[in-house]
Amino acid sequence: MSLDRKTELKKAYKEIKSDMGVYQIRNQINGKVLISSALDINARFNRERFILQIGVHTNKELLKDWNEYGEDKFLFEILDILEPDEEHQHNYRRELKLLEELWLDKLQPYGEKGYHKKVGGKEQ
């Protein structure tokens, strides 16, 4: 492959915009959800699926249900997209965290409704 072609491909790759936003992993059997955010949702879906498949997900309750019910009983869904602002520099991680907190507040995925825990009055 020529150097010009490699340079062209690298430039094209860097211009690809990934969806960033808030997503949920939803158990179709009991309705529980895990909500999180990512700078690249599609890459995060792949990562979440992989770590669940190999059995090392940090959320043990989600992992237990994944193993019990099977991968086909879980949906990976985008809840909200954060549009990039080309004109200004932003701290997208901070904005995503705030957006995630809004969704956690709205859906209250604790106890029977989700895979999140409230520890000392603080949500996790």
Image (cartoon, rainbow, N blue to C red):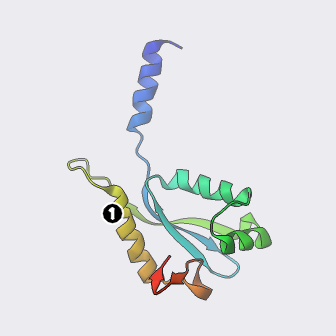
> Observer-nearest residue: 92 or 57?
57
Q: Is residue 43 above or below residue 73?
A: above
Query: Picture coordinates of residue 50 (x, y %)?
Result: 67, 54
Residue at left 30%, top 55%? 91
- Residue at mark 1: 95
> Observer-nearest residue: 31 or 122?
122
Decide if residue 31 is on the left or right side of residue 78. right
Q: Quadrant of residue 72?
A: bottom right
Q: How many marks?
A: 1
Residue at left 58%, top 57%? 45
For residue 109, say whether it is visible: no
> Observer-nearest residue: 61 or 40?
61
Outermost front residue: 120
Q: Quadrant of residue 8?
A: top left
Outermost top residue: 2
Query: Picture coordinates of residue 60 (x, y %)?
Result: 68, 71
Residue at left 73%, top 58%? 53
Outermost right residue: 68
Q: Residues within 10 Å of mark 1 (few under 14, many from 20)?
A: some
Decide if residue 54 is on the left or right side of residue 87. right
Q: Is residue 16 above or below residue 89?
A: above
> Observer-nearest residue: 26 or 111?
111
Query: Picture coordinates of residue 21 (x, y %)?
Result: 42, 61
Amino acid at pointer 1: Glu
Which quadrant: the N terminus? top right
Secondary element under disc 1, as helix, strand or loop, is helix
Query: Picture coordinates of residue 118 (x, y %)?
Result: 51, 83
For residue 43, say whether it is visible: yes
Residue at left 46%, top 26%? 9
